[in-house]
Amino acid sequence: MQYVETVTGPIKADKLGKTLIHEHFFFGYPGFQGDLTLGGYDFEEKKQQGLKVAELIQTQGIETVVDPTPNECGRHVELLRAVSEASGLNIICATGYYYEGEGATPYFKFRQQLGTAEEEIYQLFKAEITEGIEGTGIKPGIIKLASSKGEITAYERMFFRAAVRVQKETGVVLLTHTQEGTMGPEQAAFLMEEGADPKKVVIGHMCGTTDITEHLQVLKHGVYLAMDRWGLQGIVGAPADEERTIVLKALLGSGYEDQLFLSHDTVNVWWGREPVMPEPLKELLKNWKPDYLFQHVLPGLLEEGAVTSGQLEQIFSKNPARLFGQAYEPQPEQTQSQEERI
């Protein structure tokens, strides 16, 4: 059994327990660093805010959370470590950058013009995974990758290629952001073409689309698929949870629970000044909480027999243990046979 890095050190993958694959304790859009005069923070106050989130998650039996906050979006590993130590919740952090449209692009775009960016991205990923983040000794357990709506830009492809290079050398898990559920099949295909191990790849935010053919195109590569924005409805192209549920039931009915993850992609504490949400937006976001699945979605599915307790055990416990527990295996050919399951 392999070990996985958490913010408090490595643990055996089979000890992760019930896991949420995609939640953000602390997040800020690039630029918040310039608003610190009015949007500054106190470490202890933020720790207490994060601790409340951890305790809410733990009431649902969750033992581990993957926090894939990109480097430029307020990743704060010492704060995550403080929350983890105080709560006992395992937290896996990331190294990686956000998609071009909302990321901090000028730094590596400048270096892209110099011809050095992709090699430097590779060096960054490799150093953080093997040596630790910013002198803390805390190591990420995943590389976060992201693409734009309807395309994987030349800028974004640098990160994908560099991440696969590092995965081949370290076996690290790759976890992606698909903007509004687009480009999932293209992400999977590109990663496989570069030589990524599908058993250590999670294509995220696929509940952004309700076209099940998109999900099946992703799954045929043998990668994991995350439906990880439950409760986030009506904005950034997000469909209603009722529509997502139809897709989830179809995938479960076809036996794909061994390739699925469920989560919420919540932002629980914002960096900078707290956003002032208009009332209509507040109403849309009222269910966007990291316990929403367990309170409002899964009980109904269990009651109607659309999901079994065994399938939920597979999704929340067995899949994380397998994702982080398997050694890297080069994949020269794409996996095609699984598409015959539906």
Image (cartoon, rainbow, N blue to C red):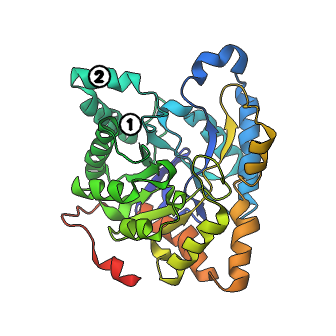
Relative to residue 318, is residue 286 drawn left or right? right
The CA span between labels 2 and 1 is 23 Å
Q: Position of residue 162 (x, y in %)?
A: 28, 41
Name above or below for residue 9 compared with residue 44. Answer: below
Q: Residue at x 41, y 27 (%)?
A: 105
Given residues 57 and 151, the one toward you in this image is 151
> Depth-wise, is mark 2 or mark 1 nearer the camera?
2
Specify the farthest residue to the top: 37
Q: Residue at x 58, y 77 (%)?
A: 249
Specify the farthest residue to the right: 279
Q: Position of residue 12 (x, y in %)?
A: 48, 61
Find disc 2 in the rendering and name its residue. Answer: 111
Label 1's element? Answer: loop
Find disc 1 in the rendering and name its residue. Answer: 131
Q: Position of residue 153 (x, y in %)?
A: 33, 39
Please say whether residue 326 is visible from this viewpoint.
no
Q: Residue at x 67, y 34 (%)?
A: 270
Disc 1 crowd, CA 10 A, few/some/many (<14, 14-19, 20+): some
Q: Which mark is residue 13?
A: none
Please say whether residue 68 is visible from this viewpoint.
yes
Q: Position of residue 321 (x, y in %)?
A: 48, 66
Name above or below for residue 109 compared with residue 149. Answer: above
* Disc nearer the start of the sequence (2/1): 2
Location of residue 329 (image quadrant): bottom left
Name above or below for residue 277 compared with residue 266. Answer: above
Amino acid identity at mark 2: Arg
Amino acid identity at mark 1: Glu
Relative to residue 39, is residue 81 drawn left or right? left
